[in-house]
Image: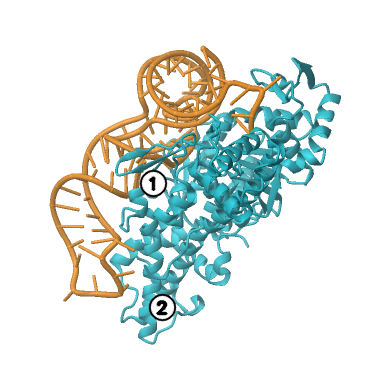
Chain colours: A cyan, B orange
Amino acid sequence: MKSVLESVKGQIIVAIRQAAEKAKTEGKLNYDSLPEFVLEVPREKEHGDFATNIAMLLARQAKMPPRQVAEIINSHIDPEGTWVARIEIAGPGFINFYLNSDWVYEVLPQIEEQGDRYGNSDAGQGKKVQVEFVSANPTGLLHMGNARGAALGDTIANLLQAAGFTVTREFYINDAGNQIENLGKSLEARYLQQLGQDVVFPEDGYHGQDIIDTVKRLIERDGDKYLGMDTALRRELLIQYALEEKLQAIKNTLREFGVEYDVWFSEQSLHDSGAIDAVLEELRAKAYIYESEGAVWFKTTEFGDEKDEVVVRSNGIPTYFAADIAYHKNKFDRGFAWIINIWGADHHGHVKRLKGAMKALGYDPDRLDIVIMQLVRLFKGGEIIRMSKRSGEFVTLEDLMAEVGKDAARYFFVMRSPDSHLDFDMDLAKSQSAENPVYYIQYAHARICSIFRQLKEKGGTIPRAGDCNLMLLKETAELELIRKIVDFPHEIAEAAVNLEPHRIARYAHELAGLFHVFYNSHRVITDEPDLQNARLVLVKCTQTVVRRALHLMGLTAPESM
RNA sequence: GCGCCCGUAGCUCAGUGGAUAGAGCACAGGUCUCCGGAACCUGGAGCGUAGGUUCGAUUCCUACCGGGCGCACCA
């Protein structure tokens, strides 16, 4: 269904176009082709409900000052069939449209009808899109970078779904390569240590307590049965046990965090199936591959990289990059129209070469978008919490959820642009006060629920929008609230298409603010039945949108707090 | 040194090729006999620097300054 905003704007755009064409036909305006003008909501309310820059864009072609072009278009506009009440020309040549404010009321019956589907659009036209995020090594627990990726990726996926895309959420399991080998060495050392042997722990091993815990559980289950084995087999068995356990832990944590994946894709499977060999063969056939110093190289310099990249090490084992090429080829071959990866800033250097590899294989690299998110700094008591994997000291996602809760964690990770470094204030995140945006938004929802409880106690019910005189909603606070609600579908679509989940966090906060202003200045439950009914409809619709916005970010919408 | 990201109010951050650049916090003052005070209102101050493109630049380009992250036969 078309949103109210879309249809209102659409009408005006058509009227503008017709006016320009009519003026051209009458010889009053000269141009070859109509430029791509915009009709947007001006920053200043005084500049009307919508404004267009068409006159300024036409000025050159028309060989006339912009304001004169604006006058000519204005005099040819037929406002019939639009909500336009008045048109003004202002500034350097803007055409400002002032609408009969009744147009905004249209949205309330629409929300009533659509319920939690309000805000959805068909911007994506059902196109298949894949969002791959977190994809942590199953060698440890999830850290803050993974956590931000989880919140961002899942919210982006939610937004894309709402915007009409068919979304697949995917986790790429890095269960191959050096990290795993290293895990094996670490596990073995801990295993032997636990059984009383004096072995040296590998310098660059995984120092975390979780490795020790894993080994303890294994000993509990199997005792010392691995003691007498040869190292290679022992490591393999230890790895097998640890991977299974760690992956399960990751799955559980992410589920707790509100993230449900459609696909868990194993890197090892690409090695086992021969997919990596096949893709390297393909690249070799296209002459992008050469051998040097015992290793196999891919000519990434042909795609703007500073130096070529190794795909098969001299020990014969393919690198992570080789697996990644095979993996992304696999993604394209699964028919996704759009492939989105969420990566930490520490991986940005791979973007160019991965896209280059896709181009080399004949895929359109523009269908692959990589969202690079900047790093997270945790603050507590005004101090930075230093984390280091090496020392085994880091706050895990589980720790964070235990400390501040799922809702606060998800909101804080999403509220900033991915491009922005995130200072995560743990004290603020868990504070139950108005300064905490999470509570501020959720409180708006709880307040609305409270109004309905009051209503019920008084024996009242929420009326149907069609049975109300919505035009009684004429206070500024009411109109601004409705206007914000009107924007919701557009906000979702923009946030989705541009991969900007923070927009929805902001939107939710602003919406809650407008509701609080309304609530504070006007009573919903009053002794004027008609006004009360109209306001009940407005509040009900606000509740729907607040709830939906919270859900898109993966937060709960509490009925009381 | 090279590459990517960032530099906007005291702090944390939005934002836009255009008409008077916003929010939250902090600070100061105020509101409410009333549906939940986890609320609301008022106030000040800002686009890192220097050029360029443009009718118009905070936005695009270049250089510089400052910060983060990369620059492995790790992932």
Closer-to-camera residue (A112/A69): A112
In the image, what residue type sits under mark 2?
A: Asn
How many marks on residues? Answer: 2
User: Sequence-wise, which precedes: disc 2 or disc 1?
Assistant: 1
Q: In the image, is residue A148 above or below residue A321?
A: below
Q: In the image, is residue A259 above or below residue B64?
A: below
Query: What residue appears at the point 39 percent right and 50 percent down from the top-left corner?
Result: A45
Chain of the residue where label 2 is placed in the rendered structure = A
- Report which residue position mark 1 lands on: A44
In the image: residue A266, left or right of residue A479: right
- Which of labels 2 and 1 is toward the front? 2
Q: In which quarter of the image is the N terminus of chain A?
A: bottom right
Chain of the residue where label 1 is placed in the rendered structure = A
In the image: residue A421, left or right of residue A477: right
In the image: residue A230, left or right of residue A437: right
| Element at label 1 | loop
Measuring from the top left, give residue A548's x and y in whole percent: 51, 62
Find residue A533 and name its label. 2
Q: In the image, is residue A87 above or below residue B33?
A: above
Measuring from the top left, give residue A117's x and y in whole percent: 58, 65
In the image, what residue type sits under mark 1?
A: Glu
Query: What residue appears at the point 49 percent right and 75 percent down from the top-left corner?
Result: A465
Mark 1 nearby-residue class (10 Å; few <14, some 14–19, many ≥20): few
Measuring from the top left, give residue A29's x and y in whole percent: 59, 37
Q: Quadrant of the C terminus of chain A?
A: bottom left
